[in-house]
């Protein structure tokens, strides 16, 4: 269900639809996990299992004309923004019908037609891009905003200083979304950063909020509050989502650097299990869940089958699209 | 037709492009109220206002990032990097983001952004304010690089760069800013990728660009006294470059010198030479000679810098060698 408010499309943020989206991301990534284990996914695969509530909660308050930019762990961000499932799978499998024709892969899923400006292989690089996107949106004056997802690891990158400064100085509508999962690769956050995001935000006079990033309603509510303010009066906001990276940094990561306690604590915080108990408490039946799961799984099956049937890119497409073809200009 | 300073042509191009298309905006350090560190953006703030002319803080990574993100969101940004040396701080956004977005996203994106960067020595500005780094960018698939040598080309290439759907690095030589040359009353765009013959000649082709064109023309005047006529070929665009024009000139002269202000090793000249050693091999009557700066950082002391920078006399010597 969706309602149109002015130019902006605000998706229904009812818990049922948020749950469905989280489930779709989870199941899609679980399929990728299996495909990777079977050797069918080339390259690196960074799964966002455990972090779905952030992408879904944030996207629930964005419209197509709002932009998002993401990082290496961006499957959920892309799907929540509305990237088509079959093109998404085909891209990660390196097929011709991938959203990026198989030239980007998992770390570069993008769909500019719906304002998804790309996942990114460079930690922190989405922030300057989003700053520019927000400037363009502000110049257009239609009340749209630009969101950027980044991990706690990106807090140590120099560009955050430049972007916090510029967005604050010029009142640009950037929603900085930090997914703090406590890890950057194999190192804990506390060994990476001598300050914290709240202090960083405060020193640039940017409004900050920390939320439980595994509570999809909490994320959606806070994001909604921020985004409404930003549409009325452009300026940046920071939302720090405390979340959990349930899988390794990448698939194949043995995770010998994490202890059992952390692992068991994470499953207690699972955002999907949590939303499910909320829905059960609201009176939804087991049957409702069964049906929904079947529906989501069959949606994934259809998309994945399409993706698997897509051919490998042709070798002559290798040098296509390096530049934009121009009629009459050689 | 009137004689104008190169800087005036740059300014005029920016002004006309902003008049023609209101998605064009300018961003850089001191480009607004101060009119630009070299005054290339003088008057733009007054005419177009702070919503189109952005005085940025000293933050090259986000200046380039603003260009990338704004280009992805429907604008035509023109970013100025005060000295080309400072572009090192913007490399991720230029090389990993701007250059790759189109290919990496399967052709979904065109990033019509321009980065203007003054290069070159001659001002005793020292090792971090004098470099010619254009070869780095020419090496990156997805970027275009131009380096105009006179006012008409500065105007025409900047207009083409702003109109271009892809990222273009416009390299302007600082010592040319004050130089006067002719600009037509109704100046036209100059296509990217097309070289020009600045002076025809039958004996040796001298391929060059930017401020070295002037040196090559001086060399031509000296050599003509010796009865040697060099053909001065101004590339104007470095990526893509006009291979066809170079090979056709070589087919007339059978001798080739490639000259640039940048360090000789691994430079633009190396690419031109390698291509001509391949597709122009049958035309060559002598080894190809490069003229470029020595393999050392650009020095500060006047005498050292004068020795460092290649000039007309170096071109004359190289031409004589190809004829020896
Ligand atoms: C500029 C840069 N440096 C290093 C890396 C290698 N790298 C990829 S992900 C990562 C950790 C990022 O941690 P965080 O931002 O917290 O994201 P998370 O993986 O936890 O989601 C690193 C160091 C990179 N891709 N880019
Ligand atoms: Mg992390």
Image (tube, helix red, strand yellow):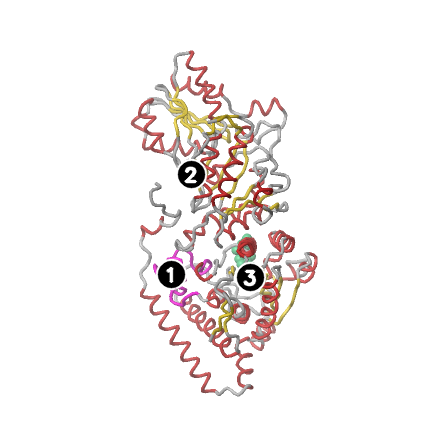
- Quarter that holds the C terminus of chain B: top left
Query: How far is mark 1 from mark 3, CA to CA?
Result: 31 Å
Q: How many marks?
A: 3
Magenta segment, which residues? A83-110
Q: Are marks 3 and 2 in contact (CB under 8 Å)?
A: no
Q: Is residue B267 magenta?
A: no
Question: From the viewer's perspective, is the residue at label 3 or at label 2 nearer?
Answer: 3
Q: Is residue B234 above or below residue B37?
A: above
Image mark 1: chain: A
Q: Which residue is drawn at 47% across and 38% down?
A: B158
Q: Which residue is drawn at 42% across and 71% down?
A: A31
Residue that carries the numbered disc 1 in the rendered image: A98
**In screen coordinates, is A197 left or right of A330?**
right
Q: Residue A162: image x %, image y %?
A: 62, 51
Q: Which of B87 and A167 is in front in this view?
A: A167
Q: What element carries label 3?
A: loop
* Mark 2 Cα shell of 10 Å, populated few (<14), some (14-19), many (≥20): many
**In screen coordinates, is B303 left or right of A81?**
right
Q: Is mark 2 within 8 Å of ligand 1?
A: no
Query: How far is mark 2 from mark 1, CA to CA?
Result: 30 Å
Q: What element carries label 2?
A: strand
Query: How far is mark 3 from mark 2, CA to CA?
Result: 39 Å
Residue that carries the numbered disc 3 in the rendered image: A143
Q: In this view, does A62 lie above or below A281?
A: above
Residue that carries the numbered disc 2 in the rendered image: B239
* Mark 3 Cα shell of 10 Å, populated few (<14), some (14-19), many (≥20): many
Q: Nearer the viewer, residue A276 or A35?
A: A276
């Amino acid at each position: 269900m969706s309602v149109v408010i002015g130019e902006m499309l605000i998706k229904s943020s009812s818990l049922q639809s948020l749950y469905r989206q989280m489930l779709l991301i989870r199941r899609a990534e679980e399929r990728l996990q299996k495909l990777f284990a079977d050797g069918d996914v080339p390259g690196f695969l960074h799964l966002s299992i455990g972090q779905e509530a952030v992408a879904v909660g944030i996207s629930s308050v964005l419209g197509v004309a709002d932009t998002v930019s993401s990082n290496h762990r961006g499957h959920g961000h892309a799907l929540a923004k509305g990237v088509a499932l079959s093109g998404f799978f085909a891209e990660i499998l390196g097929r011709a019908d991938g959203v990026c024709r198989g030239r980007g892969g998992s770390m570069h899923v993008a769909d500019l037609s719906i304002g998804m400006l790309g996942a990114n292989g460079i930690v922190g690089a989405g922030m300057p891009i989003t700053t520019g996107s927000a400037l363009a949106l502000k110049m257009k004056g239609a009340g749209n905003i630009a969101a950027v997802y980044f991990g706690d690891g990106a807090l140590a990158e120099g560009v955050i200083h430049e972007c916090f400064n510029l967005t604050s100085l010029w009142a640009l509508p950037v929603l900085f979304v930090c997914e703090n999962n406590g890890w950057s690769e194999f190192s804990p956050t506390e060994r990476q950063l001598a300050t914290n995001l709240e202090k960083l935000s405060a020193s640039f006079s940017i409004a900050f909020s920390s939320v439980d990033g595994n509570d999809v309603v909490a994320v959606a509510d806070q994001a909604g509050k921020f985004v409404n303010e930003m549409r009325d009066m452009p300026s940046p906001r920071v939302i720090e989502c405390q979340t959990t990276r349930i899988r390794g940094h990448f698939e194949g990561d043995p995770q010998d650097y994490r202890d059992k306690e952390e692992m068991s604590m994470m499953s207690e915080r699972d955002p999907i299990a949590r939303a499910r108990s909320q829905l059960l408490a609201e009176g939804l039946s087991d049957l409702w869940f069964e049906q929904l799961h079947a529906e989501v799984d069959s949606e994934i099956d259809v998309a994945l089958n399409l993706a698997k049937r897509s051919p490998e890119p042709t070798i002559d497409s290798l040098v296509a699209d390096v530049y934009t073809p121009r009629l009459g200009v050689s | 037709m009137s004689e104008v300073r190169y800087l005036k042509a740059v300014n005029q191009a920016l002004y006309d492009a902003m008049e023609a298309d209101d998605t064009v905006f300018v961003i850089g350090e001191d480009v607004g109220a101060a009119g630009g560190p070299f005054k290339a953006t003088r008057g733009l703030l007054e005419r177009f206002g702070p919503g189109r002319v952005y005085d940025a803080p000293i933050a090259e990574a986000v200046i380039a990032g603003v260009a990338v993100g704004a280009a992805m969101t429907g604008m035509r940004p023109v970013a100025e990097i005060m000295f080309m040396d400072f572009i090192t701080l913007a490399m991720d956004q230029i090389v990993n983001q701007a250059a790759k977005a189109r290919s990496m996203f399967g052709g979904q994106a065109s990033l019509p952004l321009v980065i203007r960067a003054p290069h070159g020595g001659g001002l005793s500005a020292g090792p971090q304010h004098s470099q010619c780094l254009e070869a780095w960018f020419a090496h990156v698939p997805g970027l275009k690089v131009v380096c105009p040598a006179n006012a008409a080309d500065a105007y025409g290439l900047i207009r083409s760069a702003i109109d271009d759907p892809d990222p273009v690095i416009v390299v302007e030589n600082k010592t040319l800013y004050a130089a006067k040359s002719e600009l037509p009353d109704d100046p036209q765009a100059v296509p990217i990728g097309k070289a020009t013959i600045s002076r025809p000649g039958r004996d040796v082709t001298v391929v060059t660009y930017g401020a070295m064109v002037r040196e090559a023309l001086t060399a031509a005047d000296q050599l003509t006294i010796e009865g040697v006529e060099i053909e001065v070929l101004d590339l104007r665009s470095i990526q893509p470059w006009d291979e066809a024009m170079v090979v056709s000139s070589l087919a007339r002269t059978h001798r080739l010198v490639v000259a640039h202000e940048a360090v000789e090793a691994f430079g633009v000249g190396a690419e031109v030479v390698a291509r001509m050693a391949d597709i122009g091999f049958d035309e060559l009557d002598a080894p190809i000679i490069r003229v470029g700066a020595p393999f050392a950082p650009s020095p500060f002391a006047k005498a050292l810098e004068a020795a460092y920078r290649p000039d007309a006399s170096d071109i004359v010597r190289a031409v004589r060698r190809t004829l020896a």
